Amino acid sequence: MPQAVPRPTLQRLLRYLRELERLEAEGTPTIASDELGAAAGTTAHQVRKDLSCLGTLGRRGVGYRVGDIVPTLRAALALDRQWRVALVGAGNIGRALCAYRGFRERGFHIVALFDSDPRKEGCTWARLKVLPMGQLRRTVAELGVELGIIAVPATAAQGVADQLVAAGVRGILNFAPARIIVPPGVQVRSVDLAVEAEQLAFLVSAQSTQPPQP
Amino acid sequence: MPQAVPRPTLQRLLRYLRELERLEAEGTPTIASDELGAAAGTTAHQVRKDLSCLGTLGRRGVGYRVGDIVPTLRAALALDRQWRVALVGAGNIGRALCAYRGFRERGFHIVALFDSDPRKEGCTWARLKVLPMGQLRRTVAELGVELGIIAVPATAAQGVADQLVAAGVRGILNFAPARIIVPPGVQVRSVDLAVEAEQLAFLVSAQSTQPPQP
């Protein structure tokens, strides 16, 4: 697959994969492009276009073979492997992410947990002991960590990002409500939970016929 | 602002607002469109286009007045008000979201917490007592709850969504890794944390020149 996959295409491919894996678990052998499109919130035409880029073609009257397409899609999306992850920030969000089964199930293993607060040092969350930031660099190298998760307050986020990059991490999932800057060669995805709520609120307001309550 | 704002435009407007509020807190009086664009990951042209839709024009050589544009943008995005939110699911993610300051700071107040597990009933998280699902409908009506957050396992998500809709909730923020279906007039935004990790992993893989490790 080409390196520069547009973000919306990537998101659609991940949604197809979710649906196809669900079908695989159910034992459903095939799916038509219109059904897959409906499940992923898009059209049959878009499904066929996206999947043809992977060299995966459905057959007229049969559709896509679930058992064939799942491994192809997982490989194309670099999901046919495991990732080791270091998490920084043992606050509420950090602790929830440590325990989040969705990460493990999808191949993301949080193998180390860090916090700058000495009072949290040595505490254990989801079988991970909270380590001091001074051990980040060595731990990342020793455990072969490639991805970092930032779950610290906004003001601390850039400093933590710098330390993760210096330790050799290649990608950062940032939950702090702050923009972080990394050098070329390091990838960042930011998840701002309040922005998700704001988008929802806007959609609710926009569709209401009455003026919103004060 | 028109009701049907495309999702990318909405996301950009929210990013501008974040940056403008940061400048306001710092006491910066004006910002040029190219600076605002750089902070929000877009171009000066796009900034001018997006903001002109709000009737907000910068002045050549001066830029946008931060103190004028912040309230305009907040009103246009329906963020000049408070929202009452019910959260269903007192597991790790649900508890972290209850304690998440970012929601309160942006006007989203979680006023009730529900769980179907009788063992959790009466427990208190972030000053909220866990209530049984049987009290959802009455509580939503009594407290004037308009938004719901789903933080339950995938298999339970649709049932919880149905109960929230029946209770009169108008928007749902879904953290369960499941697609939920709601009637017209109810808005849903889904946040799949594992998909965020998968997108990051793909970007890291795509840019690495070496083949990924097995």
Image (cartoon, coloured by chain):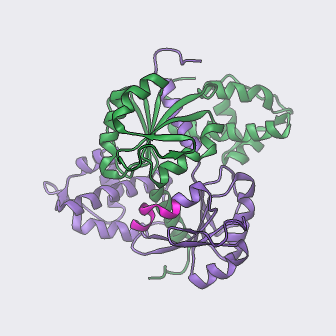
Chain colours: A purple, B green
Q: Residue at x 44, y 32 (%)?
A: B171
- Exactly how many numbered labels are in the figure? 0
Q: Quadrant of residue B77?
A: top right
Tell me which secondary structure the magenta stretch mostly adopts: helix
In the image, A12 versus A55, the foreground residue is A12
Q: Is residue A65 visible?
A: no
> Quadrant where the N terminus of chain A lies?
bottom left
In the image, A154 versus B87, the foreground residue is B87
**In this picture, residue B203 sits left or right of residue B62:** left
Magenta stretch bounds: A97-106
> Quadrant where the C terminus of chain A lies?
top right
Q: Is residue B126 above or below residue B5?
A: below
Q: Residue at x 63, y 82 (%)?
A: A141
> Is A14 in the magenta?
no
Q: Residue at x 50, y 35 (%)?
A: A200
Q: Position of residue B185 (x, y in %)?
A: 38, 26
Q: Is residue B106 visible?
A: yes
Q: Residue at x 34, y 51 (%)?
A: B154
Q: Position of residue B66 (x, y in %)?
A: 79, 32
In the image, A63 versus B163, the foreground residue is B163
Q: Position of residue A47 (x, y in %)?
A: 31, 52
